[in-house]
Image: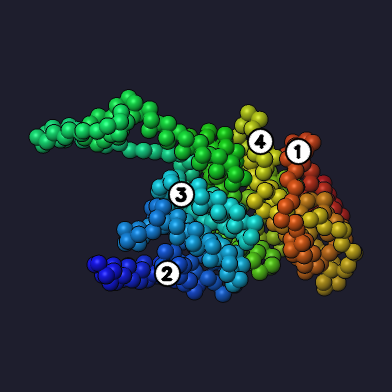
Amino acid sequence: MLSGELGDARASKKQKQQTKASTSRLSAIVDAQPVTVAGGVAEFGLTDEGVAILPVCGVLSRRFDWLTALCGWTTYDGLSAAFDQMLADSRVKAILMDVESPGGEAAGMLDICDKVIAARSVKPVWAVANPQAASAAYGVAGSAERLVLPRLAQVGSIGAVIVHIDQSAYDQAAGTKYTAIYSGERKVDGWAHAPLSDGATKAMQSVVDNCRQQFCDLVGRQGRMTSSQAMKTEAGMAPDSAAVDGRYADAIATFEDALAELTDLAAGRSRSTSAAASAVSTGGPAPMTTTTTAATAAQTETPAAPAAPATAQPTAAAAPAAEAPADDGDNCPTCNGSGKKTQAAAQQAAPTALAAPAAEAPAGGDTYTAEMASETLELCAIAGVSSAEARKFVTAKTPITKVRADLAAARANASDEATLNTAQPAGTAKELVTAGWDSAIAQANKLNGIPTK
């Protein structure tokens, strides 16, 4: 033991056990190459397409040690080292956190969450609550740029708790009496062998109140809801559609659907059709059912594009979400009061405005379909381009391949210090979104000779 050989042998054995367990889980959910981080403090899987899958499972604790490895916990030390390695690895094009955790230790949570938020400006960072991201785990998952959850999954519990056990009655029944000799009035606050004093109760309440407030401030920085809206959740949990309506999460989707879409995004391809195919096979709702638009990213009812003759509609159709809860005028600086983060959030630079593309015949002749127009609008929404710029693509009948190329070039040239416009636009968010979509769809219909009602 003094030479360290026994300790090294035990550490090596436990690292192998943890690596084997992590590898087994990763192999069960996706075909990925296991990558060990910092000698075994964490591990992620890397797909052939460059998506790093980071498991965030079990209880969350601050430091990595033999107990956390043995119990299969996730540590903030491990997550921090994993993000450092994934961001520095040129093979990693995007990051997907696979979260299944009831939460854990408060200390250290804010630091790793801030690192996740900062990582969003370097590479796409998504998360899946698969099927639970509660308390500290929600802090980590919600810090991703996009958070989705499958049906019946739950997220939330934006709060804090300290549990005190008073076993003085048990001690008395056992004939045991504890006497503490101490110096300092609050030295034995929370001592289990005596009832909790009024002073200790107030002190502990102050600690958890401060923790909850900082947790809510973190949620405000994430961009889905404001700090005061997070406080109003009263640390409740929300399932699937209620989580999307309440702005805890962005969409309903399975882990496989999220991975497929993120893979396409990392590769610069259009949105994957696997999400809709999965919804059809399970009989469930269409996944990725957010109502984000390029104009304001507000949640509202979105009019569907009319079907064009002999063409299929886009696979990932937008679904209406519930109206945002009133917040007494407390507007999120990254969402202009809509409760949904804009693509020009402070943590991630927005693409520069695109110049109007030159008129060019679309591939396959002069036919420009409503499906092509809809896909153009979706690509622009993902890239954070305004609806006005998106309509320029539609008006010019720009081929999809050129739209993708222009958006990619604009993103590459975007400034890292984009100025955040916090001014509230004229009119309500719902009116602006509806007007933007109506105008774009009407233009597409006009180009294809479809009468607009």
Q: Out of 172 and 148, give the one closest to the viewer.
A: 172
Q: Are marks 2 and 3 in contact (CB under 8 Å)?
A: no
Of callouts 2 and 4, which one flags the residue occurring earlier in the amino acid sequence? 2
Real-space Cα distance between discs 2 and 3? 21 Å
Of callouts 2 and 3, which one flags the residue occurring earlier in the amino acid sequence? 2
At label 1, which amino acid type do we have?
Ala
Real-space Cα distance between discs 1 and 2? 48 Å
According to the picture, the residue beneath numbered tag 4 turns out to be 331
Q: Label 3's element?
A: loop
The residue drawn where x is 64% and y is 44% is 340
In the rendering, at what x and y percent does residue 240 appear? 52, 48
According to the picture, the residue beneath numbered tag 1 turns out to be 423
22 displayed left or right of 147? left
Real-space Cα distance between discs 3 and 1? 34 Å
Find the residue positioned furthest to the right: 359
Q: Out of 298 and 89, give the one closest to the viewer.
A: 89
Visible residue check, residue 154: no
According to the picture, the residue beneath numbered tag 3 turns out to be 108
Of callouts 3 and 1, which one flags the residue occurring earlier in the amino acid sequence? 3
Of callouts 3 and 4, which one flags the residue occurring earlier in the amino acid sequence? 3
What's the mark number on residue 307? none
At label 4, which amino acid type do we have?
Asn
Q: Label 1's element?
A: loop
- Residue 391 sits in quarter: bottom right
Q: Out of 383 and 448, give the one closest to the viewer.
A: 383
Q: Are marks 4 and 1 in contact (CB under 8 Å)?
A: no
At label 2, which amino acid type do we have?
Gly
